[in-house]
Each structure stands twice: as structure tokens, then as C-alpha cells.
Image (cartoon, helix red, strand yellow):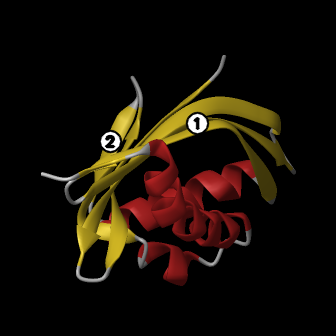
Amino acid sequence: MASYTAQQAEALLKPQFEKYGKLVDDEVWAEVEGYYHPNGVLVHKDKEAVYGSKAITAHLAKFAEGTGKSVATILNAKYEGAGDYLIITADFSAETEKAGTVKGKFLQIWKKEGDRHLVFHDEFEINP
């Protein structure tokens, strides 16, 4: 199984992650869904988990309704990868319309499917 240096993993994943992040900020849910693996899982740590790309996108859209328009800033991103998987871990800070500043951290594992990677495991937690 091939492993990637942090630089190789970042070069492969960062452009996809940035497009995905812009679509989330812009609430383009139909396109966001295309970034999730059909068997993907979204985990809100210690709260709940959602399975499947359609359910994940619906959950994200519902969450966005509660916070209103938001723009996230990604901090301390670390990239790594091995075999068919690329991983990003980072902190985030989102300026939201209805919930003020929301901060937390996340882990995403992207799995290779054909010629691209899709989010297979998306786990986040929000700081109290």
C-alpha cells in the first residue's frame, strides 16, 4: 500500500477540499452531495451519526438553516494519506448569521473512487 508524504496528500486533496468547502459555504447542496461517498458517514462527535450521501447532505442543509449563512475559515490543516485514502484534520472557525462564531475541529477521510476521492468519513465537534 502506497503512503503519501504530507505534501503529496495536500497536493491531491487540498484543491478538492477547497471546492467542497466553497460549495458548503454557498449552500449548493446538490453539488455538495456529489463530494460524499454513497456509503459515507457524518459523525457529530458524542451527538449523532448520519449514513449515506443524501442523508448527510440533508443533515448539513438542516444544520445550515439553524446557523444561517456562514463562512468557514480552516486553521491548522494537516494532510496525510495511504493507499486509496486521503485525510485532512483541522480546526475551523465559522462566522454565522444566526449562531455567531462557531469553532471546532474536524477529520475527513476521503476514499478513492475512480479518478477522484470522495468523503467517506466526516467527523466534527463543536467547541463548547
| Disc 2 residue crowd, few under 14, some 14–19, many 20+, Cα 10 Å | some
Does any portion of residue 58 appear in the rendered image? no
Q: Disc 1 designates what residue?
A: 90
Residue flagged by tag 2: what amino acid is it?
Answer: Ala
Q: Nearer the viewer, residue 55 or 127?
A: 127
Determine the image quadrant of residue 95: top right
Could you say which disc has been placed on residue 61 in the image? none
Q: Residue at x 80, y 60 (%)?
A: 69
Does any portion of residue 71 appear in the rendered image? yes
Image height of 46 relative to 116, above or below: above
Extreme-top residue of the structure:
128
- Mark closest to the chain's N terminus, 1 or 2: 2
Image spot of residue 5 (x, y percent)? 40, 45
Residue flagged by tag 1: what amino acid is it?
Answer: Ala
Q: Is residue 31 left or right of residue 55?
A: right
Quadrant in which the C terminus is drawn: top right
Q: Disc 2 designates what residue?
A: 49
Image spot of residue 79 (x, y percent)? 48, 44
Image height of 18 relative to 45, above or below: below
